[in-house]
Amino acid sequence: MQPSSPHSAAPANPQKARSGLNRIWHAAGYSMEGLRAGWNEKAFRQEAIAAMVLLPLSLWLGRSWMEVALLAGSVVIVMIVELLNTGIETAIDRIGPEWHDLSKRAKDMGSAAVLLALLLCIGIWAAALFQRFFHG
């Protein structure tokens, strides 16, 4: 009996075998599932609701396309980082519920990334508001 080649075995993930538009279609579906899963997380839901207000507001507050892009982009970055943080936390929880120094470190670093994204967003919005209302 011949040993099977690693290339002849069916991939563990069917997405790896897809190509072209079929792969893009399925990847988009997985992304939508990820957004739905994110919606179930309280922090992401709060940020998404804030984005529903802040993204249109960025069109009014920004005086150029670059300012609008910075304002809107900073909001979207917070949501991206929150999804990544939730992914890290979910993977750690999948490994096991017991306390471990490395699990704590991974979760703390994910949380710190969210904090930095929020501080960046707040700083950009504060500067734009100051420029609009106090600087002329």
Image (spheres, rainbow, N blue to C red):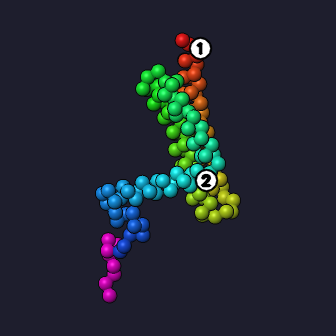
Q: Disc 1 and disc 2: Cα gap in Å?
A: 39 Å
Q: Position of residue 81 (x, y in %)?
A: 54, 44
Which quarter of the figure has residue 24? bottom left
Give the amino acid at mark 1.
Phe
Which mark, by number, is residue 134?
A: 1
Whether 32 is drawn above or below 56: the answer is below
3, 118: nearer the viewer? 118
Task: Name the residue at 49% across, 28% down.
Answer: 59
Can residue 59 be seen in this snapshot? Answer: yes
Whether 133 is drawn above or below 17: the answer is above
Which mark, by number, is residue 120?
A: none
| Sequence order check, earlier mark of 1 and 2 | 2
Q: Position of residue 82 (x, y in %)?
A: 57, 45
Task: Name the residue at 51% across, 39% down.
Answer: 76
Task: Name the residue at 62% across, 51% down.
Answer: 41
Task: Name the residue at 63% across, 56% down.
Answer: 103
Q: Is residue 62 left or right of residue 110?
A: left
Whether 118 is drawn above or below 123: the answer is below
Q: Residue lying farthest bottom?
A: 1
Residue 122 within the magenta-colored segment of the rendering: no
Q: Which residues are magenta?
A: 1-8
Crowd class of label 2 (few under 14; some 14 to 19; many from 20; radius 10 Å): few
